[in-house]
Amino acid sequence: MPDNLPTLPPAFAALPDHAVVSLSGADATAFAHAQFANDVARLAAGQWQWNAWLTPKGRVIATFALIKRSETELLLIVPDYRDDSLALSLQRFVFRRKVRIETRADLYPSGTFAAPLRAHFAQVEDRGDEIELDYGGSAEKRTLRIAGAAAPQTDGFAGRWRASDLRHGLVRLDESQREQWTPQQLALERLHAFSVKKGCYPGQEIVARTHFLGKAKRSLALLESDAPLAAGAEVCADDRGIGTVVSVANDGHLAAAVLPLEREAVALTTGAASLREIPLLDGLERPGSA
């Protein structure tokens, strides 16, 4: 058998719990830079970054991948927003800027647990009708694709992708957990998803104060459970509440929780379930501004 057979492209499966929101127009980059927590102005065209939109009190409304196709066209890949609510909320802050914001129902996110053929780290592969991103970390290869045709839905795939997100420290915020947590509490610095130096954006003062004064007292921990958990569940140590489950996967047996940075090495529980802390995976960070 010859050794130079062509490499077959990996099979992609639909991610129906992800949406694509576009920002287009002369002020698209300026609007995103002013509203979002990461430095959009310094991101090069053809690259992507993790980013977040915060409340004025510095609580995370949404986290997403932001692709800069050009200075006048940006795409947000947003998990767990399946309707127009995020686009409509952003639209309220446009005022006189020349930017159009819309949920792109004609673009379909999909993924595969394989390395991209051409995209690498923050550099996207943009073929016009398809865009591919390197969504992998140090321990797991992943590719996310946006295309004009939907990929097939595969049983269990979206749940496996969600679990991989949590293992890498990318928290998935269901509606009950939005506007509850600061970027530091969700460990978004691991993803380089926010800036403390770029200038004003909603919540910037609180984020910067926490960073420069060293007042972050809680952060993200990854937990395995012997019983199903739900977002919002209280995490206890010696029957004393110390934190909260923010996001779950694997039918509730894998959880991301906000816990004190300084805590005793004692058994953790929630309800009748015993919890075991496991390390977060590295390598999902992309370009950002400190």
Image: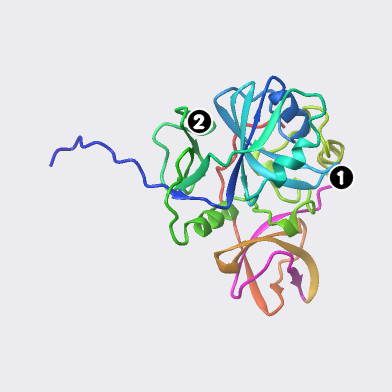
Q: Quadrant of the N terminus?
A: top left
Residue 235 in magenta stretch: yes
Which residue is at 81% across, 24% downward? Answer: 96
Task: Kindly tell me whether residue 19 is visible in this rendering.
Answer: yes
Residue 262 in magenta stretch: no
Q: Give, as a three-letter code, the residue at label 1.
A: Lys
Q: Earlier in the sequence, mark 2 or mark 1?
A: 1
Which residue is at 68% across, 54% downward? Answer: 173
Secondary element under disc 1, as helix, strand or loop, is loop
Image check: 56 left or right of 281? right
Q: Is the residue 204 above or below the residue 154 in the image?
A: above
Q: Is the residue 148 above or below the residue 281 in the image?
A: above
Which residue is at 42% across, 38% downward? Answer: 116
Which residue is at 42% across, 41% downward? Answer: 115
Q: Position of residue 105 (x, y in %)?
A: 57, 42
The stretch of residues the image draws in magenta is: 215-238
Q: Quadrant of residue 231?
A: bottom right
**According to the image, label 1 marks what residue?**
57
Image check: 216 left or right of 13? right
Q: Position of residue 88 (x, y in %)?
A: 74, 41
Q: Is the residue 179 above or below the residue 116 in the image?
A: below
> 166 or 128, which is in the foreground?
128
**According to the image, label 2 marks what residue?**
124
Q: Give, as a three-letter code, the residue at label 2.
A: Val
> 157 or 210, which is in the foreground?
157
Label 1: how many Cα within 10 Å (few below 14, some 14–19, many 20+): some
Secondary element under disc 2, as helix, strand or loop, is loop
Q: Give the Cα distance between marks 2 and 1.
A: 33 Å
Image check: 185 left or right of 279? right
Q: Mark on residue 128?
A: none
Q: Position of residue 180 (x, y in %)?
A: 79, 54
Residue with the most extreme left position: 1
